[in-house]
Amino acid sequence: MSEDEIQVAVVALLEREVFARERRGAGKLRFSHPAQSTRVPPRQQSKLKRMGVRRGLLDFFLVDLARPGAGVLELKTSDGTVQPEQWDFLFGFASCGVPTFVAYSVVEAEAWLRTQGFLRCS
């Protein structure tokens, strides 16, 4: 699977959870994938940089308003490499007590999301 395909699959898992929680009144889960500048034309990259998008930004930011809790998730393909700037973000969040994880497949991402309590209703 490509990283984009992994990302779409993880979004589907998270969206099912959001829907299930809303249907059951089980507390809100919010997540976001921030804009990235690596796959856009140079002009758009420049604009995103001026808007504050930086190298190393992680793939998912999650907030569970039912617990409360937060987490960050980085997705890679099976042969993907975490870049130094991404490690900076991962270590920074972890040092603040925020759960962090690098998943190399949908299965790994789902397991971590369940372990951390982000997926519990779906």
Image: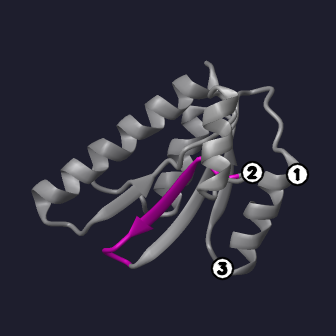
Verify whether residue 100 appears in magenta: no
Q: Position of residue 16 (x, y in %)?
A: 28, 42
Tell me what residue is drawn at x 51 percent, y 63 percent: 116
Q: In the picture provided, is 18 more to the left or to the right than 47?
A: left
Of tags 3 and 1, the one toward the viewer is 1
Verify whether residue 60 appears in magenta: yes
How far apart marks 3 and 2 lie (CA) works out to 19 Å
Q: In the picture provided, is 23 more to the left or to the right than 111?
A: left
3 or 1: tag closer to the N-terminus: 1
Q: Where is residue 54 in the image (x, y as percent from the top left)?
A: 71, 53
Residue farthest toward the top in the current orientation of the protein:
1
What is the span of residues highlighted in magenta in the rendered image? 57-67
Which numbered circle lies on residue 97? 3
Tell me what residue is drawn at x 41 percent, y 56 percent: 31
Name the residue type under label 3. Answer: Gly
Quarter assignment of residue 80: top right
Which numbered circle lies on residue 84? 1
